[in-house]
Amino acid sequence: MRGGGLRLALAVSALAALVLGMPLLKPLFTALYPALERPLYEGDSFLALTADHLALVGASSLTAVLAGVVAGILVTRPAGAEFRGVVEAVATMGQTFPPVAVLALSVPAMGFGPVPALIALTLYALLPIVENTVAGLEGVPDAVLESARGLGMRPAEILWRVELPLAAPVILAGVRTAVVINVGTAAIASTVGVKTLGLPIIIGLNGANQAYVLQGAAVVAALALVLDLGFERLTAALSRWRRA
């Protein structure tokens, strides 16, 4: 097993150990925090919270990928070039406003639940995806585009068969950044009634229970590491495919 695969396997093992074996760590947290009456979070299983967390991250990231890639393609076409400033401004504003602020503005209109969280996380993930899509498409060499036109390819064929495959590693890097950011940011969704790994963190902060905070943060960090290393492996595989 190569180095990247070994790191991913170790990260997955650590995540599985935390998610499935957290109850076995109760003696450890009892020793670390003897003053706490309940040193282990037992409100929901960490397996269920991880699944809910991943569902929210997946939905928001997928929405951001679809919107960001389409927007990036649009502004790099002659017909949509005039909208580039608007698209970049919207994407930048998505990260300028903290997700907490977006949640605070969305809840009065939409109520508590996953919808405000989905909107906040999607907006927060847009910027790296839009920027990398534009950078990837604009980085395709002119000589390659001219060769494709010389072969009689139409603009749509050039986009799908030449530009997007060549730009894929750069776009994937933006998606990787957005997903890893969303893993951490999704924890705040528990403030609006969504079950995520942020639940033990928020309950721990409200109840001055540092053990709960540590448990939730450890699983979030492990999950972010697994996804980051997974994207690293995917990028490496994509690069090998391009060279082949």
Image (cartoon, rainbow, N blue to C red):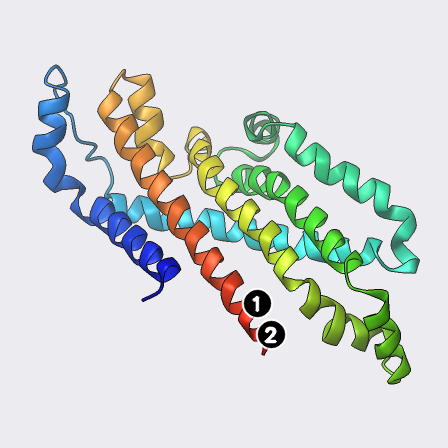
Q: Quadrant of residue 171?
A: bottom right
**Residue 58 against residue 222 in the figure, above or below:** below
Q: Position of residue 212 (x, y in %)?
A: 25, 28
Q: Residue at x 46, y 38 (%)?
A: 186
Residue 121 shown left or right of residue 32 in the figure = right
- Mark 1 neighbour density, 10 Å: few (under 14) some (14–19) many (20 or more): some
Q: Position of residue 210 (x, y in %)?
A: 25, 21
Q: Report if the CB atoms under discs 1 and 2 are less than 8 Å apart.
A: yes
Which mark, residue 173?
none
Residue 138 shown left or right of residue 51 in the figure = right
**Badge 2 is on which residue?**
243
Mark 2 residue type: Arg
Mark 1 residue type: Ser
Q: Position of residue 109 (x, y in %)?
A: 61, 31
- Mark 2 neighbour density, 10 Å: few (under 14) some (14–19) many (20 or more): few
**Residue 221 against residue 76 in the figure, above or below:** above
